[in-house]
Structures are given as C-alpha cells and as structure tokens.
Amino acid sequence: MYALRARRRTVYRNLLSLILGVLLPALSAGPARAGYEVLTGDYASHDPVITRQGDTYYSFCTGSRIPIRASKDMHDWRSVGTVLTDVPSWVRTKVPKYSGSSMWAPDISYFNGRYHLYYSASTFGSNVSAIGLATNVTLDPCDPNYAWLDSGGPVIRSRSADNYNTIDPALFVDNQGETTRSWLAFGSFWSGIKITEIDPVTGYPLSDPPVLFSVAWNGSIEAPFIISRNGYYYLFVSFDSCCRGVESTYNVRVGRAASVTGPYIDRNSVSMVNAGGTRLTWNNQRWKGPGHQAVFRDHDGRYWLVHHAYDAERNGRAYLRIHELFWTADGWPTLQQPGPVDVNDVLAAWWALDDGIGDIAVDSSANGYDGAVIGPTWTAGDPNGGAALLFDGIDDYIDLPDGFTDFNGLTVSVWARPSGAGDWAAFVDLGNGDANDNIFFGHSRTSLVFAVLNGTDNLGTVTASRAVTSNTWQHFAATLDVSGGAVLYKNGVPIKTGTTSPPWNVTRTDNHIGRSNWSADACFQGLLADIRIYRRALDTNDINDVYHEGDKAGHQ
C-alpha cells in the first residue's frame, strides 16, 4: 500500500491536521435530521409489531406468552404483561416438538370490533409449525373488559411434507376494492412467502384446505408485511439470517404490486418471486441485522418502520427500532426524508481548486477540510479562465484531514477531465486504509465507479459502463440515500441506479483526492476541479443546480 502507507506529508500538513482535529467544527454540524427514534425504558424486543389504541401505543413481540409493552409517546416503553397466561393445549398437539413457552412473531390488527393477534408456534429450522389467534375487545389492561381469548386451534398449519412454513403471520385488511377483504401473509424459507384470504368473521382461511398464493421467494426470506397506499400494495420482507446476535445479516426488502396477490416487483423491476426486493435497512457499526419489520400508520397519517436489530454494545441482544418511513415522488418507501433541501446546509466539504497557487487545496465550505497538495500542478485548464489541478497519474494526490464521520446519506460531485485509462483511478477515496470504511468515487478505464465498504465488507459497487470520455471536461456525481439507493450522474443526468450500504459514521483517517487507498489501483491522470461532498443524497434538481452552478458549467 504505497510503501506501507508512506506519505510525503510536510511539516505544515502535520500541523494543519493537529489544528483541524482540535479546533474546527465536526462534520456532524448541521440541522436536525430524521432518523431512528431514541427509545428508553423496557424495549428489548424480537420480531416487534406496534399498534395504537387511544393515546397509548402497544408493542407485541416474540417471547414467553407474547410480551406486551406500552408507551404514551412511542419513545419510553414499559412492560404491561403478556397476551397468554399459558401455552394453549393445542400447540403441543399440533407442534409435537414444541417446548417452553415462547411464541413467535405476533401480528396485531383491529376489525369486527376486536383486536386480532396472530402468532406462531414452531421449532427452529423446522416447518412443522402452526399459526394461532387470540382476540380482545381492548388493549388497555386496566379496562374491566380486558381479556385475551385464544381461538382454541391453529388458524393454519404446515407439516414436514409441505413446501412452506406457517410462521411469521401478518394480516392485511384490503379496503381498496368495492368490498373489504382480509388476507393473511406468512412464510419463512422453504418456498417463500404465501398469502391466503381470511374470513373476517372467524379470522380463519375462507376454505379448507386454504388457497395459497406465492408472492415472494429467496433462499432466505421471511417476515412478510403488506400495506396499501395510493393504488399499490407494498410487500415488506426480511432477507438473510436472524437470531445470531451481532453476526445476524437480516435486512428489510420491499416490492409493490397492483394486486394484493401480486406480482410484486422491486424498484429495479425484478419480481419478488425471483428473489427481487429493494433494500431498506443495513447494518451499522452498532446495530446489526435490522429486520423482521412491520409498518405502522399512526393517526396523523405518518408511516413508521418497526423492526428489531442486535445491539453490538449490549452483547448482541435484540431491541426495538423505530424509523419514520417516507415516500419518494414515484411512490417508493424510503428512510430518506424527501423534500427540498438547502444544499449549503448539508455541504460537508468543497474544494473549488481555483486557488491557482500554493500547496493547500482550500475547503470553501469552512468545515476545515483543507488538503495538502502533494504533486499536482496548478494549471489554467479551466476554459472559463479559472484554475484546475493537473494530476500526473503516477504519484500525485491531495491528502485530506481526518474526519468525514457523520453522514445521513451522501453525495459526491466532481468536475473531471481524465487523460489516463487506469483501473480504479479515484477522484475521491475516503477511508481507513486498504479495504476499510471506504467511500470510493472514480473511474475504471471508461466506467464510472462508486463503492462503499463498511468495516472490511464490500457491500456494493455501482458501475456505469462507457460513461467516462478521455480529454473532455465532464461533471460526475454519485448520490446514496439512507436506504442504500445509489444514483450515478453525468452532466446532470442520471445514468445508473443501484444499491450499496450507507457509510458508517466512523472517523476516516486515510482520505485523498486523486488516489485510492489500494496500492494496486491507478492514480488519477488528468484535470480535476470543483469537488464537493454533501451529507445527504441530493435529488436530481439539486444535482442539476450543482452542475449548472458557477464557472465550472463551462467545462463541458
């Protein structure tokens, strides 16, 4: 790695880093932003679901006899008992190897004057499973009418010979047609996610045996949840593995359909029965395996994504997590708050590279990320009379200070006039050395490349082939929202979409313009100007504004 990371740092550079680390504002400075709710009290939880009655929120989750928690504000939670007083006798009959008292993955809904709580009984790794049902007229344990009544038998069950697994139930009441119809979604591994129509009077399937519709499949899929919004049905599922503490790889996916029975298609037009699903959640350095989701719509119309994640700071125990769910202009759920943004409020760093002299690349954002110019030469390469930096493609680069810590989404914008055709030549690479916490944006020959690595895991690269032209000024940008949706732009026009992990909020200590952290990668060769980093994914209008802004618009 460049001779064991040997750097040609000057005395000034060392002094500058010290001053920046002590005196200058952190990257996290800026306006308040949407994110996960801060929870207190008793909120350890696995497979949670939330509903509301009156002024109180109630949460149900996997556990002994189905634990119940209550909150007045959806932040501070307290235990208020359990749904069941004992394991129903039918469970041990229908699921012979069942032991203990833990019921899995409850779901709560209200119809026909009663709350309906579906739950599942099974053993790990088996599809000999059953879904049960308990009902109540109220969720308030202080109400004299409070009493949970179990239905006395399985709503639906699976046997070892079946190719599906009856766990993880989720009821959906469909009010979009001329008549109201109810559907129960369920499934885990095996042949994937199924739904069947439910009799709203009994809460059981309309027919025996039930008619099943297959709506999603992946080698490791479970935890379906269906909602409707603006003419679409949205199917949320969890991919990969739960229940392994900090080693869990759970993540939430989503697709949508025009019919409740499908076909459900993700944002890239891949069917969910063919392993499609647009990703919504990712690990971060503390919270692992964010999954087994539900979606709760509050009285004010706001949507909330509810799931569990494993806390690396508390021995990998599962806790409740709540994040507001937003919607894009074209109707897709996202954790990124939409709407207009003042790009100056989310500007993390801006190297205009118009200085024209000296060994400092000044950060015009005033956030203190001035860089040490090590090798590149100033040139009047800007066709509008301004300066740019010429990189020789051998060992020229700009060394940037430590930081680049707090992102709520990300945008990297750069004007470039490449003259070399090397592999993985970085415009910008922020990280902690070789393959560790990297944010890479550059080109590989004629392909535009954007990649994010968290820790040492390569969680995604987005590549736009044949997007880079030699010896021509071009504006490139990469945006990444908090749900992992990435867009690559050329000259203000989106040219490629994909997914990769949002960057973890860690301090990055090996940060450069014009070179990568990998010793085998090419250094950038050509001219660079006007490089900007934002703490949020800018939308297409914002990218166009940046593209057309200032004297760099003449580069093309």
Image (spheres, grey):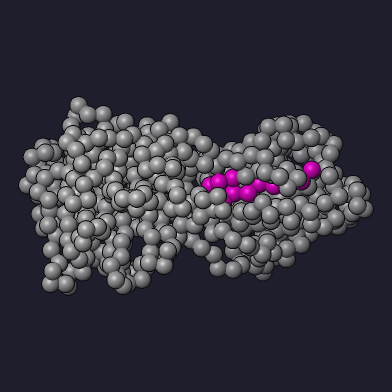
The residue at the point 14 percent across, 43 percent down is 154
Q: Is residue 479 magenta?
A: yes
Of 137 and 438, nearer the camera is: 137
* Magenta stretch in the rendered image: 474-486
Residue 427 % position (x, y): 73, 44
Residue 554 % position (x, y): 86, 50
Q: In the figure, residue 155 lies in which quadrant?
A: top left
The residue at the point 37 percent across, 58 percent down is 296
Determine whether, in the image, residue 3 is placed left or right of residue 316.
right
Q: Is residue 425 magenta?
A: no
**In the figure, 225 relative to 460: above or below?**
below
Residue 513 % position (x, y): 73, 47
Name the quadrant of the N terminus: top right
The residue at the point 57 percent across, 40 percent down is 498
Determine whether, in the image, residue 412 is placed left or right of residue 419.
left
Q: How many marks?
A: 0
Residue 261 % position (x, y): 36, 39
